[in-house]
Image (spheres, rainbow, N blue to C red):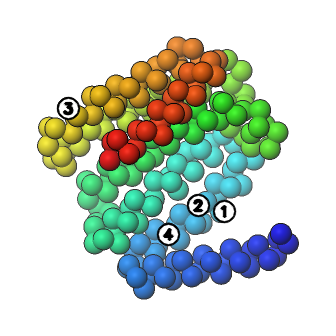
Amino acid sequence: LDPRYALAMGGLFAFIAVSGLVYVANPLSALLAAIALVLYVLVYTPMKRTTHLNTWVGSVVGALPPLMGGTAGGGSLASPEAAVLFSALFLWQMPHFLALAWLYRADYAQGGYRMLSLGDTSGSRTAGACMEDSVYLALLPPACWAAGVTSCMFPLESIGFNGVFLLAAYRFYSHSSSQAHARRLFLASLAYLPVMF
């Protein structure tokens, strides 16, 4: 595609999407969409070629759509529910994408994308980051109960799916250079969100 054509079409679609949200939802949902768009296009995308921190910025972008849905349905950004949704999506994306980045680190390198896994020849930094965020994710259900967002059943029910996810993260952490354990963590991440929600 000609870059000018792509820019024009992207700008047109962005305008239609953001202004459409003002009309069908509310200005706050449209503002969140505009923030996600700016972060994705002007911050996250350029960062892909300069720093591995792009994954953290990309996770913010990926965690904004549930907030948009919540505010479109009349919810508040200042609610504990909004904080839980954002936190769950943000924390989940780290082991999900970092395991994927470990599996396809040669492809990322060939494409010129800076990922945590590229300078991590042993995999220990990548697996450690996956483990850390998996622990934080496992602590989210008890935090929801402590904050009064859910009943005590949510942390109890989460023991199973968080246990499986933590085990997958721990195995990758224990065998950080293992493609098989990185793949299992990635596959566990695919099942995690539907089961959690």
Separation of marks 4 and 1 at Cα, in angstroms: 14 Å
Is residue 87 at all visible to an observer of this figure? yes
* Residue 48 against residue 135 in the figure, above or below: below
Regarding mark 4 in the picture, which secondary structure is present there?
Answer: helix
Q: At 80% across and 44% down in the image, what residue appears?
A: 111
Q: Where residue 153 sits in the image (x, y, percent)?
A: 16, 38
Bin the neighbour count of mark 4 within 10 Å (Cα to Cα): few under 14, some 14-19, many 20 and up.
Answer: many
Q: Where residue 149 sits in the image (x, y, percent)?
A: 19, 49
Separation of marks 1 and 2 at Cα, in angstroms: 6 Å
Q: Earlier in the sequence, mark 4 or mark 1?
A: 4
Q: Nearer the viewer, mark 3 or mark 2?
A: 3
Separation of marks 2 and 4 at Cα, in angstroms: 10 Å
Q: Earlier in the sequence, mark 2 or mark 4?
A: 4
Amino acid tagged 2: Leu
Q: Earlier in the sequence, mark 1 or mark 3?
A: 1
Location of residue 137 (image quadrant): top left
Amino acid tagged 1: Leu
Q: What numbered label is drawn on residue 156?
A: 3
Q: What numbered label is drawn on residue 42?
A: 1
Regarding mark 1 in the picture, which secondary structure is present there?
Answer: helix
Q: At 28% across and 67% down in the image, what residue appears?
A: 75
* Residue 70 against residue 96 in the figure, above or below: below
Q: Where residue 49 sits in the image (x, y, percent)?
A: 75, 47
Regarding mark 2 in the picture, which secondary structure is present there?
Answer: helix
* Residue 17 against residue 46 in the figure, above or below: below
Q: What numbered label is drawn on residue 33?
A: 4
Residue at image mark 2: 39
Q: At 18% across and 46% down in the image, what residue appears?
A: 150
Amino acid tagged 4: Ala
